[in-house]
Amino acid sequence: MTISRPVVTIFEMYGSGASEVGPAVADALGVPWVPPFYSSEYLEAAEGRGPEAESLLSRVLAALGRTAATADVGVHSGQLDQLDAEDAVRELRAQVAEGGVVLGRNGTVILADEPRALHVKLDGPVEQRIARGARAAGIDSARARARQQREDSARAAMSQRLFNWDPRSNDQFDLVINTGRVPLDRAVQMILDAYRLKVGSDQ
C-alpha cells in the first residue's frame, strides 16, 4: 500500500550531521523521526565482542537473533540474510505507515518505489566529518576517527549483504548534500525544497 504522508530517507556517511538535519526535517513535515537501528555506540561495542577473527558484520547480523537459533537445523547464511531482510522491510514499512524521516535502515532501497518518498544522502570531507562526529558525541578525534572508519565500512557492508546495494554509490538518491560545504540549517531547507519539487506537495 502506498504511503500517503511525507517520507524522507537519509543515508549518512559518518559525521555528516544527520542527527541534527533529520529531526528538523521531520518536525517541518509533521512526521515521526525514525533513528538508525544500530547506533554508533552499539557498533563500537559490537566490535569488541566475539572471536577476534570474526568480522564486525557477522557479529551485528548474529545479534538479530537468528544465527544461534538456527545453527543446528541446517539453515544457511543466505536464508538467514533473506529472513533478516524481510523482517527489516516489514518493520520499516510499519514504522512509516503514517510518514516519517528515516535515518539508515536501508530505507532508500526498501522505499524506493514509494511516490511520496525523497531519498537523501549526506556526505562530506572525511576530516570535517570526523571533527563533527567528535563534537556531536563529546569524544576525542581519535575515537571519532575509529567510528568513521568502522561505520562507513560496516553500514555499507550490511546494505550490500542484505539488500545487494551499495549506499556509497549515489545512484539511488534523489539528493546528495555535502555538509562540509552546506550549513546544516541550509541542508534542512534543501531537503524540504527537494521534497516539494519531487512530490508536488505544498506541505
Image: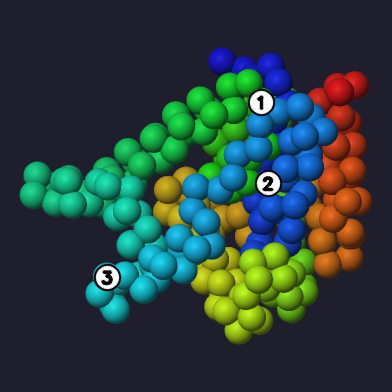
Between the residue at mark 2 and the residue at mark 3, the CA separation in whole angstroms equals: 30 Å
Residue corresponding to mark 2: 10
Residue shown at 89% from the left, 43% from the top: 189
Q: Is residue 155 left or right of residue 49?
A: right
Q: Nearer the viewer, residue 198 or 184?
A: 184
Picture coordinates of residue 121 (x, y %)? 72, 52
The residue depicted at 50 percent of the width and 63 percent of the height is: 41
User: Which residue type carries mark 2?
Assistant: Ile
The C terminus sits in image quarter: top right
The amino acid pointed to by label 1 is Gly
Q: SS for tag 1?
A: loop
Mark 3 neighbour class, 10 Å CA radius: few under 14, some 14 to 19, many 20 or more? few
Query: Residue 7, image x and y in percent?
Result: 69, 30
Question: Looking at the image, is mark 2 or mark 3 nearer the viewer?
Answer: 3
Residue 75 in the image: above or below residue 92: below
Would you call the spot at circle 1 few (<14 residues within 10 Å), some (14-19), or many (20 or more)? many
Q: Which residue lies under the disc numbered 1?
A: 99
* Amino acid type at mark 3: Gly
Element type at mark 3: loop
Judge left or right: residue 24 versus residue 96.
Answer: right
Residue 110 sits above or below residue 41 on the image:
above
Q: Mark 1 and 2 residues: CB-CB less than 8 Å, in contact?
A: no
